[in-house]
């Protein structure tokens, strides 16, 4: 059966955009403060999951909701399972948007909204690819499950639950990265650093707060400082901002002097794409007579972490010939004059190094009294480029785009693809398109989402029908 996949995608454009808009209007970032037994990750992730499953039920798929954490739509049968793994959660919107992040807006052929690039736009494009295959009545040789998780942007509680209670798929892909294909992902671990609260200097650090998530470069930072020399601090801050790639504001308030810095958010897998407002603010504050734990906290951020995504100052610089550099994102920075300081460092590491090594070396660099705690980790993932799933998906991509130069890649980002031995990440960001994941004004070109839908439809057909 010869199919014009691009034409099939075009037929579904209006319905796709309508369903995508419905999904994007759900603020679905994880919120543990509102968690309940019925909504264990907060109301947003649950609503996004049930909304997607309702769409799949409308379209005639068999569906299952597992504890409001993860769910799937299914067609076909057989001993083997092809899985498409997407997520319906997203990062918090943050500041700096020109439009309402939860009211999708189309400008110049691009759709703007939180989650439109990561991962609702690509995920729904892949779902519509599966819908096209279903509507064409193609004879499948595998069961196909479209599985959606609800906290990919945090600790993968939902997808981990799926793999605990359901059989592992035979092979599959995650539409949660970029084209042409991701066949390798670095390991991922976060370290939490803890500092005391003593501060008996001429300047007192009342509070410091920067960052929304560990896997996001902080756009905003705010500190409250108690001092008798407000005028000099204000003059110095203005001079600092004139010399640095950040903006900011200083305000005198009853509690002291409030300093605010604005940088640029970016995905934590490559911190060089962002400007970390928190480390810049800490660098400025090290010029003043803070003392004790507050001074140690600021000095560590400024001298061991600032503008050092390859962790050279910590003695952790490492590079693998296949998987590339170890990277470090300083995702969360906070200090409270009663509770002390806390930092969360997110590392993306290649094969050849272990989380325990990172933890030990960071502890060795900490000042006296500070401690480090290692979080859960994911080991590096790699699928041989000669594996049929890689070759088949690359063939489809090349056939539909004419791009024969691009090759499979290894990245620092983590996708659900790594949960399968024969799992890869596949689209939907095209090679020359700006990456706005985890940033304000996140967008995705509509024509590229439609191109991705066609690629996904043919790919599913290739992987799940007899050639």
Image (cartoon, grey):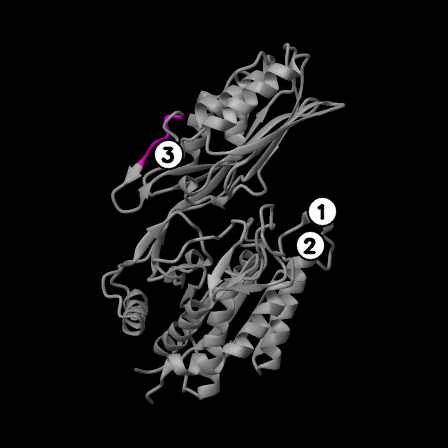
Secondary element at image label 3: loop
Instruction: Answer above or below: position of 332 versus 293.
Output: below
* Relative depth, front residue between 296 and 116: 116
Secondary element at image label 1: helix
In magenta segment, residue 143: no
Q: Earlier in the sequence, mark 2 or mark 1?
A: 1
Mark pair 2, 1: CA separation: 7 Å
Q: Quadrant of residue 452?
A: bottom left
* Relative depth, front residue between 92 and 322: 92
> Which residue in the protein does label 1 denote?
33
Q: Which range of residues does the magenta coloring cover? A: 314-318
* Relative depth, front residue between 249 and 264: 249
- Whole-percent x, y for residue 330 in the image: 49, 35
Question: Is most of the magenta stretch helix, strand or loop?
Answer: loop
Quadrant of the frame with the C terminus: bottom left
Q: Quadrant of residue 58?
A: bottom right
- Whole-percent x, y for residue 421 in the image: 38, 59
Mark pair 3, 2: CA separation: 35 Å
Q: Residues within 10 Å of mark 3 (few under 14, many from 20)?
A: many
Q: Residue at x 33, y 51 (%)?
A: 410
> Which residue in the protein does label 3 denote?
310
Instruction: Answer above or below: position of 283 versus 433.
Output: above
- Whole-percent x, y for residue 402 in the image: 26, 70
Give the label on residue 42, or none: 2
Do tag 3 and tag 1 residues touch (Cβ < 8 Å)? no
Q: Is residue 297 visible?
A: no
């Amino acid at each position: 059966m010869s199919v014009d996949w691009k034409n099939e995608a075009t037929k579904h454009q209006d319905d796709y955009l309508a369903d995508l808009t419905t999904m994007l209007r759900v603020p679905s970032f994880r919120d543990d403060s509102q968690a309940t037994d019925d909504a264990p990750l907060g109301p947003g992730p649950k609503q996004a999951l049930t909304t997607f499953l309702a769409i799949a039920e409308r379209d005639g798929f068999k569906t299952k909701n597992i504890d409001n954490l993860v769910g799937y739509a299914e067609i076909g049968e057989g001993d083997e399972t092809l899985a498409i793994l997407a997520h319906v959660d997203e990062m918090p919107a943050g500041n700096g948007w020109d439009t309402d992040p939860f009211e999708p807006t189309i400008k110049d052929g691009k759709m703007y909204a939180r989650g439109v690039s990561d991962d609702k736009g690509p995920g729904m494009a892949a779902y519509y690819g599966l819908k096209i295959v279903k509507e064409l009545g193609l004879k499948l040789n595998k069961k196909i499950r479209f599985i959606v998780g609800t906290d990919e942007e945090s600790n993968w509680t939902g997808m981990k639950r799926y793999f605990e209670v359901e059989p592992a798929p035979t092979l599959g892909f995650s539409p949660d990265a970029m084209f042409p294909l991701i066949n390798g992902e670095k390991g991922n671990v976060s370290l939490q650093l803890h500092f005391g609260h003593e501060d008996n200097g001429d300047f007192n650090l009342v509070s410091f707060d920067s960052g929304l998530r560990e896997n996001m470069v902080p756009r905003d930072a705010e500190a409250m400082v108690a001092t008798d020399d407000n005028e000099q601090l204000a003059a110095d801050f203005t001079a600092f901002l004139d010399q640095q790639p950040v903006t900011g504001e200083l305000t005198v308030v009853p509690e002291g002097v409030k300093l605010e810095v604005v940088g640029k958010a970016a995905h934590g897998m490559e911190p060089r794409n962002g400007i970390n407002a928190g480390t810049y603010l800490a660098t400025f504050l090290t010029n003043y007579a803070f003392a004790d734990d507050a001074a140690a906290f600021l000095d560590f951020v400024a001298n061991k972490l600032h503008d050092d995504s390859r962790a050279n100052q910590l003695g952790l610089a490492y590079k693998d010939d296949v998987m590339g550099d170890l990277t470090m994102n300083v995702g969360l920075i906070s200090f409270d004059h009663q509770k002390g300081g806390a930092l969360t460092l997110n590392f993306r590491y290649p094969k050849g190094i272990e989380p325990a090594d990172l933890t030990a070396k960071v502890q060795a660099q900490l000042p006296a009294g500070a401690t480090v705690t290692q979080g859960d980790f994911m080991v590096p993932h790699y699928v041989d480029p000669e594996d049929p799933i890689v070759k088949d998906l690359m063939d489809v991509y090349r056939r539909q785009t004419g791009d024969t130069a691009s090759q499979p890649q290894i990245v620092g980002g983590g996708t659900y693809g790594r949960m399968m031995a024969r799992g890869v990440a596949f689209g939907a960001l095209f090679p020359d398109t700006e990456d706005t994941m985890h940033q304000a004004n996140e967008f995705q070109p509509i024509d590229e989402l439609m191109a991705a839908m066609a690629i996904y439809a043919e790919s599913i057909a290739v992987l799940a029908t007899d050639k």
